[in-house]
Amino acid sequence: MKNIASIGSSGRSSMDDHDDEEMAKMAIASFQAREEEIERKKMEMKERVESQLNRAEEETRRLAQIWEELEVLTDPMKKEVAAARKRIDLVNRELKSLGQACQKKEKEHKEVLDIFQEKSNEKAQLTTTLMELVNESEKLRMRKLEELSKFVSTAR
């Protein structure tokens, strides 16, 4: 009898609602854990890219100095050094564009995450409103049943 009384007009028991709420909390916690892991990995990747970028810039400066010293000398390796320097400059430019792309993706990710949070909050508010409406409906129906029961009792 108690289970029948706990079933609302939606046809679901309050235990199902509690289970749904627990599942939602677990899903949100799981999502947040994944988001933290993604954020941590992004930061690691960003640090590695910045480190490589710094090393490439340092290497470019070092090679420029070597290049100047080679200009003074007549070196049979002049062409190879020039090719290596050009390749380092090219990779350095690629690293810079990758760093910019990484920052753009991070910004997009943050924007989507904010929208997701807003929608999650909206869902929670709507769920609360639904529960309030279901409870109020149950109360009104119970009052009406009691009135009808009294009416039937007095009509005898």
Image (spheres, rainbow, N blue to C red):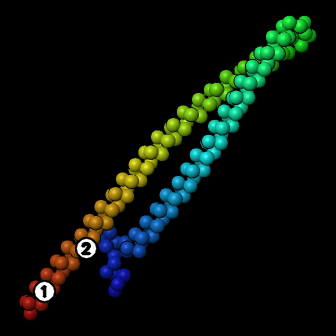
Q: In which quarter of the image is the C terminus?
A: bottom left
User: Is 10 or 33 nearer to us in this picture?
Assistant: 33
Amino acid type indicated by mark 1: Lys
Residue depicted at 62% across the width and 26% down the height = 97
Callouts 2 and 1 close, C-beta under 8 Å: no
Residue depicted at 49% across the width and 58% down the height = 28
Above or below for 99 versus 156: above
* Residue marked by disc 2: 138
Residue depicted at 33% across the width and 58% down the height = 126
Position in image of residue 116 (x %, y %): 44, 48
* Residue marked by disc 1: 150
Position in image of residue 94 (x %, y %): 67, 25
Extreme-left residue of the structure: 155
Q: Which mark is residue 61?
A: none
> In the image, is 136 to the left or to the right of 40?
left
The kind of secondary structure element at disc 2 is helix
Give the quadrant of residue 69. top right
> Distance of mark 2 from mark 1, alpha carbons?
18 Å
Q: In which quarter of the image is the N terminus?
A: bottom left
Q: Is residue 83 visible in this depiction of the protein? A: no
Above or below for 8 versus 103: below
Residue depicted at 34% across the width and 72% down the height = 11
